[in-house]
Amino acid sequence: MNKIFKLSFIAMVIAVAVAIGCKQSFLETTNPNQLTETKFWKTEADVKAAIASVYSPMRLPLSGYWGAFRGYQDVNALGDDVLTIPGGEPSTMQMAYFTNDATNGDTQDIFAKLYSCIYRANLVIENTDKANLDAALTKSYVAEAKFLRGLAYFILASNFGDVPLKLTVAVSSDDANIESAPVAAVYQQVIKDFSESSADLPPTRPTGDKGRATQGAAIAFLGKTFLYIKDYANAETTLAKLVAPGSGYDLIDNFEDNFTDKNEFNRESVLEWVYGPINSQYSPWNEESGGNAMYNYRPQLTGSNGSGGWFKYIPSQFAVKEFKKEPRPNGADTKFDKRMYATFMWKYSDFGEVDKTWYNNMTFDALWTAAWTSIDRFEPLYKNFPEGKFLNKKFTNALRPEASADNYWAATPSTANVEVMRFAEVLLLHAEAALMNNHPEQAMADINRIRVRAGLLSKTVADFPGNSGLMAELQHQKLLELYFEQNRWNDLKRWYPAADALKTYMAANLKQGADKIQARNYIFPIPAGELQTNKKMTQNPLWK
């Protein structure tokens, strides 16, 4: 990626956004050196800097929605595929046990950052034409801003429900403080933004601009949106554009390469956030200052104590059981699904295979012993391991032969990009839509592509009697394929629309806090701070 886009936290752009969004008081004097609306939006460099700032709130390495301390930590904590180690940040523990409320600081921050993204996207949409660029180039920048606005609203709709629709740059408090729109209207705006952006975004990006939105990303999220609102016909048709031969997308051979820095921007990548050795590794807390580090800090949260991590999660026994459910065929080079070896660490000899080590030749026994003090915080129910003892490998630095490789203070932090949308997810979304449209053969074809890459045998529809059998296989494969990738909770909400049914299912899987699940937990409450600022907005009905 080129330097302008890579260093997207440019104080200049943020200052411009504030200057444009707020009119000067008559008490203020004009600083001739200050960047103003009349001086900005003159060149493509201005527009490119502005579009970079739109990405920033979502991809901040710590507090962006995909950053280590926000959506990655909190949204993953809601699922039944991982257990959250007790004693962590109070905001995250509230999420994990379904005791969060409108004062939760993390959801407040997520909400605010998404609206920051939306505000900046609106600036680009309204001002790009002032730079007098080529018409096609102008369309491309506007389309990129619309895609990012649509993505922000997609996250807001799926997580918060009814929220304000802000589609123009606010110039007064009356413009900024508006009432919430129904979630159905928000999704329709998402569809509009993704549809319009898919028409004008480029299909690919040159090497220097990798990581920026493409036509494929807009199509993928458009299809995902249709699936979320249960418009299965449009979901299947839309996603078929990427599933069809010649789309340019496919599964890569090595599943694990999607989560390391070995094979970035590969053919499976539909959208990924760029991270790398940018600025000091010790300064990830600076948010949008020019010196903010852009390493990937997920290993710090995920890694176990023995690897220098903070060890916030452990695989649930339910997830382990699902991975072990279907061993590979006789004669295969591994006993279990190939994805399992990229996802977990365990003592292989406990299951009849040759042991291996990680990091600086650490055995699993050593890693488990180092982690035990944290594991011991669990309630007794969660300290029983009938499926065996397992630790997370996915999103760690376990591939590096270094001591304390997950500790960003001790070793070189991860430079791996973060996959926001993989082609594997596109296949599974398309399979679900096809199945809901009574096209089981197409669904099976999609699922088989996932299965074969995992080292499992192809199956036929006849192997899964009835739509419910194939749906169960789809859900099983999605759990394994997208484990720990911020999708599980939204999938469960869609598959179990009745809160009582979801509570029963989650309790059977020994999910922390399952007994507290209510209908209101399907969305986050509108943050209390936002309600205090915007008196026209009201709390979502489920949280009143």
Image: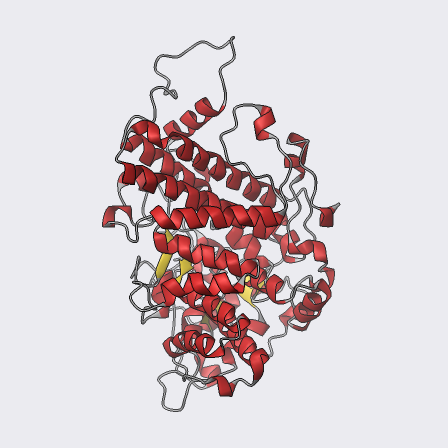
Query: Is residue 455 positioned above or below 506 on the image?
Result: below
* x 34%, y 15%: residue: 33
The quadrant in which the C terminus is found is top right
* x 49%, y 55%: residue: 301
Instruction: Judge whether residue 474 can be spotted in this image.
Output: yes
Q: Determine whether, in the image, residue 433 is placed left or right of residue 424.
A: right
Q: x and y percent of residue 5 in the render? A: 32, 40
Q: Determine whether, in the image, residue 327 is placed left or right of residue 493.
A: left
* x 60%, y 79%: residue: 386
Query: Is residue 467 positioned above or below 19 on the image?
Result: below
Query: Is residue 482 positioned above or below 438 on the image?
Result: above
Q: x and y percent of residue 303 in the render? A: 46, 60
Residue at far right of view: 544
Query: Is residue 226 positioned above or below 332 on the image?
Result: above
Instruction: Judge whether residue 420 can be spotted in this image.
Output: no
Q: How many marks?
A: 0
Residue at far left of view: 207
Q: How is the image coloured?
A: secondary structure
Q: x and y percent of residue 161 in the render? A: 62, 49
Q: x and y percent of residue 329 in the render? A: 41, 88
Q: Nearer the viewer, residue 237 or 312?
A: 237
Q: Nearer the viewer, residue 30 or 395?
A: 30
